[in-house]
Amino acid sequence: EVQLLESGGGLVQPGGSLRLSCEASGFTFSSYAMSWVRQAPGKGLEWVSSITGSDGRTFYADSVKGRFTISRDNSKNTVDLLMNSLRAEDTAVYYCAKLSNLWDNDGWGQGTLVTVSS
Amino acid sequence: EIVLTQSPATLSLSPGEGATLSCRASQSVTTYLAWYQQKPGQAPRLLIYGASNRATGIPARFTGSGSGTDFTLTISSLEPEDFAVYYCQQRSNWPRTFGQGTKVEIK
């Protein structure tokens, strides 16, 4: 069974930084791409970033490009999202998701809340 | 960026009734479209991938159809647990994009 456990959320001031982490289990981690998807309070889903399984190619939404960095450690089964220069509009629940071989989000964590406020 | 437009925004239906949800893409995504269900306080769940393939464990009352720019999610007979928000998402191009969601609520 796929299990994804996010951590690292919290309250941060505008302009600050935060690192989210997602620990995966129940599947061969290095074989699958992973994503971060966020959801602002009361709003819909927004794709943030993805990283491939073995070669670590990265993709970003324009709204976070240059500020966020996705990375993975296949030896620890973790995927991280380093968030810099945070803005109020980055406030959201951040979900870690496993991508299937067809690049659909077929497994999700329960999310971690990031609040950007002074 | 491919824009996905879902309609209607809200569907008010009774258990046992059928539901038809629409997702329209601003350009062709061939069949690279998925549907997700999200209940309050929960993470999304993959329902349909490749426009028409049910994900593991998804009941047969959920059917996806369409290709190109027009897609439909049909729920044949609503069960109490089906009242939720449904999102479509394309994986044809970067950036990946979601529709704004359709809420299926109890009438």
Image (tube, coloured by chain):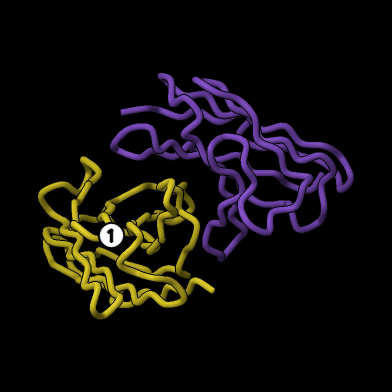
Q: Chain of mark 1?
A: A
Q: How many marks?
A: 1
Q: Position of residue B84 (x, y in %)?
A: 66, 51
Badge 1 crowding class, 10 Å Cα cut-off, few under 14, some 14 to 19, many 20 or more, is: some
B66 vs A96, left or right, is: right
Callout 1: helix, strand or loop?
Answer: loop
Q: Is residue B48 above or below residue A107?
A: above
Q: Position of residue A36 (x, y in %)?
A: 33, 58
Q: Is residue A113 above or below residue A76?
A: above
| Colour that chain B carries in the picture | purple
Chain coloured yellow here: A
Residue bearing the label numbered 1: A53
Snapshot quadrant of residue A27 = bottom left
The one nearer the camera, A72 or A31, is A31
Quarter of the picture holding the N terminus of chain B: top left
Q: What residue sits 44% from the left and 56% below the top? A: A41
Amino acid found under the numbered disc labelled 1 = Gly
Q: Position of residue A14 (x, y in %)?
A: 16, 61
Residue A10 visible in rendering:
no
B64 vs B2, left or right, is: right
A4 vs A63, left or right, is: right
Q: Position of residue B23 (x, y in %)?
A: 56, 29
Q: What residue sits 25% from the left and 55% below the top? A: A51
**Residue lying farthest to the right in this orientation:** B16
